[in-house]
Structures are given as structure tokens and as C-alpha cells.
């Protein structure tokens, strides 16, 4: 199979028939063999009924239905898990991503040898309250990830070689950083294509301002895990050792200072009356805790068996 198109969605019943017809027209014109996987992320409207109707009339349409709303990353995770195409395309269901971009994305993967191609919505039809935080977010993501050629990490329209989606794990809200996940997995030929962005035709956006705050927190988590996730002792143990040694040396200095004063007949205070003693003691305790945290981090795998367990009600 040439292409798998994965469409995560939440309450998009109006746009689904039009989106399917658009994808089908493009695929038939180019004579691609393909499948469309709609992942219904706990929609409360009639989205699933629309998907069932499309599937009954079109053998290329498949659907996954979550029992409740989990988020875009879980939807992509299960779409990646079930897809069969040599090239995987992801796009949003709100008709803001154009299926007309698919043939060129497919060509860049198959002919130019890219592992992943991310869309870049250079001209956006979004309010300023959304575009400005997006620019700041993408600038930070470029700096942290080291992927300098991407301008729109969170663009829903992307193309992947099948090997990429098999070897990355998208969880939590990490869909924003799929290029970074791919890079960490060893797929470093990552490209970008300027794509057409359309104004939303139906409904309203499902994302609020909180996604930008969560996005930065996820970026910090991903950076930390990519640097120290396999060997947490390297960071916790280092900080713990430094703090313990500084505290230990400070405690020795306090004790030696008292002994020196006693030996030379000078005035002196009890060690416990010195604030430096308690600072030293606190640093030694914190250093020990950091060190223990490093050991625990080494012992406890970060890959929980429950991380990507979601309740799926039905597949077609």
C-alpha cells in the first residue's frame, strides 16, 4: 500500500464527508493505493456515525473509536499502530490542512529520501493571539531540539516513512514534538514543505491557551529524557555529589574553626549556634536525597506498561 492517511478528530461531523471526498479525489487522480484511518477521540457529536457510514460505502475508510477523549497524541499512537502504508500522512479533520499537498509530500519521502516532512503554514488564517505564541513556541523548540530547519513543529500535516512511526512512541501531548522524537530515534533527515493553510470552515478550535504552557513543559521533559532518561544517575548523582561534598567541607570548616579557637584560647561558640552548620547540614541531606533519586531513577523504568493503554470501544 502506498499511503496511509491518519486523521485524529474530536467533534468534526460536518467536515468529515467533505474531507473524505477531497482525499479520495486526490488519491484517485494520482492512482495511489491508500487507506484513511479516522481516529474518533471521544467525540460527543455524530462523528462516529459519519465514519461508520463512510466506511460502509468506501472500503478504504477505517475507524478507531475511543470511549472518551484522551487527546491527539493517543489518537496518533493508535493510528500509527494500525496503519499499513509505506508512507504515512497525518492531517487534522477541520479542513484547514489541504489534501492537495499529499502527492508532493509523498514524493519528498519516496524520491528525495526524507524520513519525515513537516508542513509549514507560512501564511496562517489564525488570530494574532494564536500566531504570536506559536512563533515563540517554535523558536524555542528549534533551539532546544537542534532541528534548525523547521518553522512549524505543531503543524498537523506531516509525512513519514513507515519505519519512523514504527520506531517512535507518541504519548501524553508529545505530538507537538514528533520531529524531535524522530531525531532522538535516529531519523535525522527531516524536511519541511510550505503548505496551504485554510480558515476553519466548521465549528471552532478545540485548543486553548493552556496548550502553549503545556507545550513548554513537555519540551523541557522531552529534552531532559533525551539527555538523561537512560542514565538519570548522571544528573541526579552529579548534583547530589556536589551538594554533599560542599556541605561536608563546610561542616568540617565550622568544626575546625571552633577547634582552632579553643586551642588558642579565643572565644568560641557551640557548633550548633552557627548558621553555617545548619546550611552545611541541609546541603548534605539534599545531596543525599538527589543521590538516592538517581539510584531510584536507574531502577525504575520510565517506560510504564500502562502509558499507552487507552479504552477503545470499536474498530471498523
Image (tube, grey):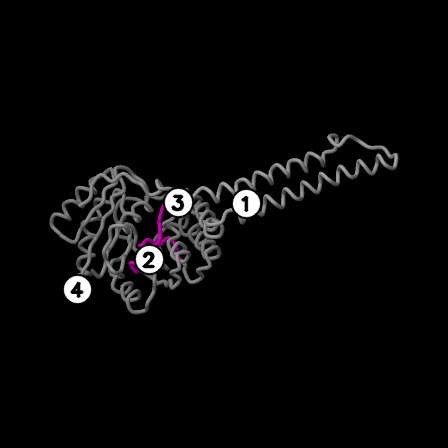
Q: For this rendering, which residue is in front, 4 or 236?
A: 236
Say the numbered circle drawn on residue 31: 4
Name the spot of residue 71 as percent of width and height, x first. Answer: 33, 43
Q: Is residue 305 left or right of residue 10?
A: right
Q: Residues within 10 Å of mark 2 (few under 14, many from 20)?
A: many
Q: Quickly name the residue at label 1.
A: 236
> Marks 1/4: CA distance?
55 Å
Magenta-span inclusion, residue 294: no
Q: Nearer the viewer, mark 1 or mark 4?
A: 1
Q: Quickly name the residue at label 2.
A: 164
Q: Nearer the viewer, mark 3 or mark 4?
A: 3
Which residues are drawn in magenta?
A: 152-172
**Residue 250 image-quadrant placement:** top right
Residue drawn at x 39%, y 45% as measured from the top left? 303
Whether label 1 touches label 4, CB < 8 Å? no
Name the spot of residue 315 as percent of width and height, x first. Answer: 20, 44
Q: For this rendering, which residue is in front, 68 or 235?
A: 235
Q: Quickly name the residue at label 3.
A: 303
Q: Residues within 10 Å of mark 3 (few under 14, many from 20)?
A: few
Mark with earlier residue (1, 4) = 4
Mark with earlier residue (2, 4) = 4
Q: Is residue 67 left or right of residue 149?
A: left
> Marks 3/2: CA distance?
19 Å
Q: Residues within 10 Å of mark 4 (few under 14, many from 20)?
A: few
Mark with earlier residue (3, 1) = 1
Magenta-span inclusion, residue 166: yes
* Image quarter in which the N terminus is found: bottom left
Name the spot of residue 2 as percent of width and height, x first. Answer: 22, 61
Disc 1, SS:
helix
Q: As displayed, is residue 200 above or below residue 68?
A: below
Whether label 2 touches label 1, CB < 8 Å? no
Disc 4, SS:
loop
Amino acid at each position: 500500500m502506498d499511503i496511509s492517511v491518519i486523521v485524529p478528530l474530536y467533534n468534526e461531523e460536518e467536515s468529515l464527508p467533505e474531507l473524505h471526498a477531497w482525499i479520495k479525489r486526490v488519491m484517485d487522480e494520482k492512482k495511489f493505493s491508500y487507506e484513511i484511518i479516522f481516529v474518533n477521540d471521544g467525540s460527543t457529536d455524530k462523528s462516529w456515525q459519519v465514519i461508520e457510514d463512510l466506511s460502509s460505502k468506501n472500503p478504504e475508510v477505517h475507524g478507531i473509536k475511543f470511549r472518551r477523549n484522551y487527546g491527539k497524541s493517543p489518537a496518533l499512537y493508535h493510528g500509527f499502530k494500525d496503519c499499513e502504508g509505506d508512507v504515512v500522512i497525518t492531517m487534522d479533520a477541520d479542513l484547514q490542512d489541504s489534501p492537495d499537498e499529499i502527492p508532493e509530500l509523498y514524493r519528498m519521502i519516496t524520491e528525495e529520501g526524507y524520513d519525515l516532512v513537516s508542513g509549514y503554514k507560512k501564511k496562517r488564517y489564525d488570530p494574532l493571539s494564536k500566531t504570536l505564541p506559536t512563533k515563540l513556541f517554535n523558536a524555542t523548540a528549534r533551539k532546544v531540539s537542534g532541528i534548525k530547519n523547521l518553522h512549524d513543529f505543531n503543524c498537523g500535516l506531516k509525512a513519514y516513512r513507515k519505519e519512523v512511526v514504527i520506531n517512535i512512541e507518541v504519548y501524553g501531548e508529545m505530538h507537538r514534538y514528533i520531529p524531535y522524537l524522530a531525531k532522538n530515534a535516529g531519523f535525522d533527515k527531516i524536511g519541511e514543505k510550505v503548505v496551504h493553510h485554510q480558515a476553519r470552515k466548521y465549528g471552532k478550535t478545540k485548543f486553548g491557551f493552556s496548550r502553549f504552557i503545556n507545550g513548554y513543559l513537555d519540551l523541557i521533559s522531552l529534552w531532559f529524557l533525551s539527555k538523561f532518561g537512560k542514565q538519570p544517575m548522571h544528573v541526579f548523582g552529579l548534583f547530589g555529589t556536589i551538594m554533599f561534598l560542599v556541605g561536608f567541607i563546610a561542616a568540617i570548616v565550622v568544626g575546625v574553626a571552633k577547634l582552632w579557637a579553643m586551642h588558642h584560647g579565643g572565644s568560641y561558640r557551640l557548633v550548633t549556634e552557627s548558621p553555617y552548620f545548619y546550611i552545611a547540614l541541609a546541603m548534605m541531606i539534599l545531596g543525599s536525597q538527589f543521590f538516592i533519586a538517581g539510584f531510584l531513577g536507574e531502577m525504575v523504568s520510565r517506560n510504564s506498561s500502562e502509558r499507552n493503554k487507552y479504552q477503545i470501544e470499536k474498530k471498523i
